[in-house]
Amino acid sequence: MAEILETGLDITQLFVPTLLWVDISAQPGVVDGWRYDGRAFSPPYHLPSALHVPTILELQAQLATLSAQLGALSDKK
């Protein structure tokens, strides 16, 4: 994953020598989080979300329904 650092210094002298640094000054679209495959940068993978994240109101409605169902079950006993 790419992290962007802008400096006027020799970046190879600022960090451990095992880190790979690539000059992206000619690639203005690259931002933090992009991937680098050794040749080119690409945006991070965004898997489409198949799950719906419920709102508080939806969760409260579900809770009310479950509470009513539990109440009905306990009345049968």
Image (tube, rainbow, N blue to C red):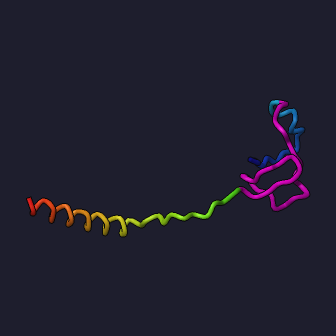
Would residue 24 be counted in the magenta stretch?
yes
In front: 62, or 18?
62
Residue drawn 21% across and 65% down? 69
Image quadrant in which the C terminus is located: bottom left
Q: Magenta residues, as a range?
A: 17-44
Residue 60 x %, y %: 31, 66
Residue 35 x %, y %: 77, 51
Is 35 positioned to the left or the right of 55 in the image?
right
Residue drawn 76% across and 56% down? 31
In front: 65, or 75?
75
Residue 49 x %, y %: 57, 63
Please tell me in which quadrant of the rendered image residue 71 appears.
bottom left
Is 75 positioned to the left or the right of 5 in the image?
left
Give the main secondary structure, helix, strand or loop, of the magenta stretch.
loop
Is 47 positioned to the left or the right of 52 in the image?
right
Would residue 33 be counted in the magenta stretch?
yes
Outermost residue on the front side: it is: 77
